[in-house]
Image (cartoon, rainbow, N blue to C red):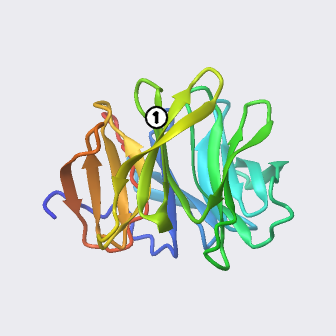
Amino acid sequence: MTGLECVVPGRNRLGESPVWSVREGALYWVDSRAPAVYRLDPATGEVRSCPLPALVGCIVLRRRGGLIAALQTGFHALDFATGALTPIVDPEADLPENRFNDGRADRRGRIWSGTMNDVRRDPTGSLYRLDPDHRCTKMRDDIIVPNSLCWSPDDRTMYFADTYRFRIMTYDFDADSGTIAGMKLFADLTGRPGRPDGSTVDADGCLWNAEFQGGRVVRYTPDGRIDRTIDLPVTPVTSCSFGGADL
C-alpha cells in the first residue's frame, strides 16, 4: 500500500463516479445513497456537497459548465453551485424499482449510462445513449448491474461490464454514428473475490478496473492480460479515475 493516501475521509454510503475537471482543477464524485454530489478542491482541501432529491448513479461534466446527473428519475442538468436541477428525459418512468448506475461521456459528447433494479438483482436494466440534442436511445437490455463504461484512445472499442455476471466485455464502437456491435469477452472474473466495477482507460490504451469486494484496482493491457494490480486497504472498491495537473 506504499504511496496510497486518503484525500477525503468521506464516509460515503456508496461513493461512485469520480470525475476530474481539468478546467476547474477539481474532483467531483457522487454518494449514490446520500444522495449527493461532492466537489474537492485539492489546492485548498475544501469539500463541498450538493444534495439531490433521488438516488444518483453518475455525473458527467458539461462543456458549458455544470453537470449532467443520472438519477433514479432520469437524466438532469445540474447547477452544482445552486443545486438547481433541470429534467432532460426519464426513459424508465414506468420502472420505479430501477435506477441509473455507471455512466460516462464519449468524445462526441454523448452520455452512456445503464440502469439496474435497485430492489432485486433482476436483469431489468438497460444501457442508454443520451445525445447532445437530448435524444435518448436504448442500446441494449437484459442488464443486472451496468459498469465499466469507457473507450479506447482510438475510439474503436467500448468497454462494458455487467458486474453480477463477472465479465468485462468489449464492443466495436463507431464514433461517428455512436453505435456498438460485435460483443466480445475481454476479462472473466469468475472465481475471483472481486467483481468488475467502474473502469477508466490510460494513454497507453490499458484498462484500469476497480474490483468490487476485491480490494484492488487491476490494469489490463489492450489484449486482456493483467500487467499490474494495486491493492487497497478497503474491500468495496467502486471506480477509478486519473486526476491532478499531470493526470
Residue farthest to the left?
2
Task: Using the rendered image of the protein, determine whether residue 50 is visible from the camera's viewpoint.
Answer: no
CA neighbours of label 1 inside 10 A, class few (<14), some (14 to 19), many (20+): few
Residue drawn 27% across and 54% down? 218
Q: Residue drawn 73% across and 31% down? A: 132
Asked if residue 99 lies left or right of residue 105, the reply is right
Where's the C terminus, which quadrant? top left
Vertical order, 236 against 240 (above or below): below
Amino acid on which disc 1 is placed: Val
Give x and y (percent) for residue 40: 47, 54
- Evaluate whether residue 35 shows in this view: yes
Q: Is 70 in front, or is 159?
A: 159
Viewer-nearest residue: 77 or 200: 200
The outermost residue toward the bottom is: 119
- Side (left or right) of 7 relative to 77: left
**What secondary structure is found at the residue carrying circle 1?**
loop
The one of 68 and 119 positioned closer to us in this rendering: 119
The quadrant of the rendering that contains the N terminus is bottom left
Q: Position of residue 197 (x, y in %)?
A: 44, 60
Q: Which image quadrant is residue 38 in?
A: bottom right
Give the residue number, with chain letter if any, for mark 1.
22
Q: Which residue is drawn at 59% across and 67% down?
A: 32
Residue 158, given in percent of the width and then of the height, sits at 49, 37
Name above or below for residue 35 compared with residue 133: below
The outermost residue toward the top is 176
